[in-house]
Image: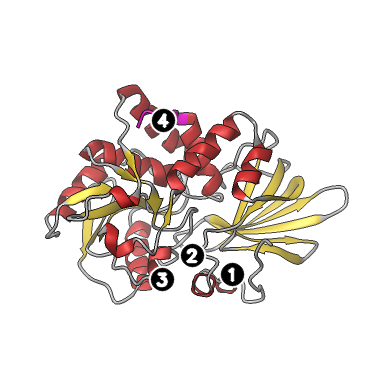
Amino acid sequence: MTAYQDPSAWLLGTTFFGTGGGGDPTEAATIYQQLANQRSWPELIPLSAADQTGVLVTAFGVGAITPAGDPTSALIKGLKLLSQNLDKKIVGIIPVEVGPKATATALLLASLTNLPLIDADCVGGRSTPEVFLETITLGKVARTPAVVINQAGAAAILAAAPSPTFEEAFFRSFAVNSGNQAFVIGYPMSSVQVKNWLATGTISQAYQVGRLLKQKKLAKVLQMTRGQTLFQGKITAITQQNQVGFTAQTIQLTNATQTAKLYLKNENLIFWIADQVRLTCPDLIILLDKFGRPLYNTAIEVGQAVTVVGVPAAKLWRTKAGCDLFDPAQFDPTVQLTLLR
């Protein structure tokens, strides 16, 4: 993995595609630096190169976007429990989504197990707030068995589930009862089983974008991702919303000529300019600070100068089935799907 060993590139790129969520960047930075110091980066391989005789698994945090601590102990214990409930060997680790700590957690687990990291993710090149909002849902890919575990070592095994929404409720309930933080280790799947339901190349893309952002080449990033600048201004108000198990807010922005508004539920999901919907999920809505660095949503504050950019979602999300699944109306019934052209 010699081409992918810059911690700051990992951090910037995964925070960009994390769309405001995807796990705390400060904790992710610690993991990335730990891997760099120990020179224990796992091999990054394409999905097509994965061993087809075994299964890929993932690991990720569930709860609000507040810090969750070092996941190492929970990952080791959770993976041991999961392995005891599998009938095939684990042959690779796949990030659940592209986000700072989500990707770092997958890298860490791959390093701890000496397994390759797969250059793809279950969410489709971004982060999302809920388990069912994953491209593997479109292919009815089973996520069980799965282990959910907290930092104290308390764990539960979900052997089977009737639906992705049941899985979300199970994991979220455990997290809420664990101080709003827990880790899931699971999603055993073969590379053949999921090849049509994953956006591939998303992890290496995040790293490449991170390198460009480190060089302050935002224009190149937008060209590479087909992104657009939507708004520049200052944050004038942040309104908290009551969503158990999530960080939910409405952000007001203004500049000399316009006002804007952003709704987030862990991730940025709906963006308005002058009370007109400008962009919604599943496309990516990303906040950048005055230096062009992507912002995590616990770092935003009133008075901050920001740039709002939009990036088209992966093709799977832009299908009818993808748009139906990640419909913004589930977050605000008055909002219609609005994508970049």
Evaluate whether residue 59 shows in this view. Answer: no
Local crowd at mark 1 within 10 Å, few (<14), some, or many (≥20)? many
Q: Are marks 3 and 2 in contact (CB under 8 Å)?
A: yes
**What is the CA distance from the residue labelled 4 to the residue labelled 2?**
28 Å
Residue range of the region highlighted in magenta in the rendering = 1-7
Q: Which residue is mark 2?
A: 316
**What is the CA distance from the residue labelled 3 to the residue labelled 2?**
9 Å
Local crowd at mark 3 within 10 Å, few (<14), some, or many (≥20)? some
Q: Is residue 159 above or below residue 43?
A: below
Local crowd at mark 4 within 10 Å, few (<14), some, or many (≥20)? few
- Between discs 1 and 3, the one toward the N terminus: 3
Residue displayed at 52% across by 40% down: 13
Residue displayed at 54% across by 71% down: 323
Q: Secondary structure at mark 1?
A: helix
Q: Which amino acid type is marked by label 4?
A: Ala
**What is the CA distance from the residue labelled 4 to the residue labelled 1?**
37 Å
